[in-house]
Amino acid sequence: MKNKEQIQNVKQKVLAKNRSETTKDRMRYHLLDGLRGLTLISMIIYHGLFDLVELYGVSIRWFFQTPGYVWQQSICWTFILLSGFCWRLGRIPWRRGILISACGLVITMVTHFFMPSERILFGILTFTGAAMLLLIPVSGVLQRMSQKAGLLASAFLFFLTRNVNRGYLGFENICLGKVPGVFYRGIGSAGLGFPAPGFFSGDYFSLFPWLFLYLCGFFLYGILMEQNAVKRMLCRRAGFLEWIGYHSLEIYMLHQPVLMLILECFFN
């Protein structure tokens, strides 16, 4: 009799788990798509102004000053945090990681051959794809550890290494020490975050420091998604922004050629 009851309990638990997983699969947090869409629009406008200034000589004084820098940083910070936050929502992270890495490679090849003065090495897509893939073997350990401790450690390491691309530790104008020059050699070191003298990329996001910001998003998911109120808020619809966010990869791949075509038609 006990064996029958135990078997029945096991069956009920399996069914409940399957229902929960099915509900999770069907659930989509629309507000995340909306936020991604809003950030993508901001990025397209920023790139449009950049093209106007760099390629067509339009004078926008504030663009390369503090307001323009803060705007640019808000875009990339939001994208990276969102990507890390959404990592656990993907059912097949390796496939998404390979796809995004491949798109990053396409951008590198196109800019290298057709726009060498604006070539992109280790751009945002290359970084995001690599971060997705790197988290696969360690995600189980990261999810079991304290999420608050993980967030604090990741934030600390991001602020500590924010300026490694420039050759020193620290955040923005805060210098905490010089990084030995031996690290800054070759194309491989640039991918890690230690670009050699003369390295150039029109869009540069190395593993360090940006992987730590990506991890901040990963741990934020573990903290915030424990709250039902947050889940309900994220399920709200976001209208047209939601559609843009859902198709963000395709739009990102097409936006620069479309901008160039529009600007060429306008100025010529």
Image (cartoon, grey):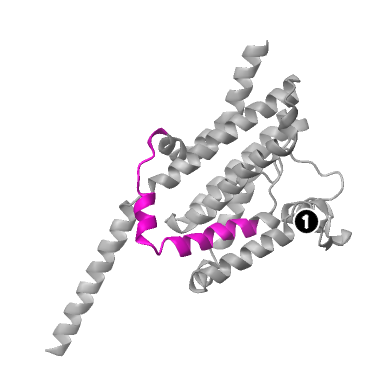
| Magenta span contains residue 234 | yes
Q: Quadrant of the C terminus?
A: top right
Report which quarter residue 46 is drawn in.
top right
Q: Which residues are magenta?
A: 211-240
* Residue matched to label 1: 164
Q: Residue 154: horizontal and vertical position, in percent? A: 62, 64
Residue located 73% across and 23% down the image: 55
Q: Nearer the viewer, residue 221 or 3?
A: 221
Residue located 70% across and 52% down the image: 206
Asked if 232 appears above or below 223 in the picture, the reply is above
Q: Nearer the viewer, residue 144 or 184?
A: 144
Asked if 204 appears above or below 87 in the picture, the reply is above
Q: Is residue 180 left or right of residue 191?
A: right
- SS majority, magenta: helix
Q: Residue 190: horizontal and vertical position, in percent? A: 77, 52
Q: Residue 118: horizontal and vertical position, in percent? A: 74, 33
Q: What amino acid type should be assigned to the residue bearing mark 1? A: Val
Q: Nearer the viewer, residue 94 or 240?
A: 240
Residue located 58% across and 24% down the image: 258
| Magenta span contains residue 229 | yes
Q: Quadrant of the N terminus?
A: bottom left
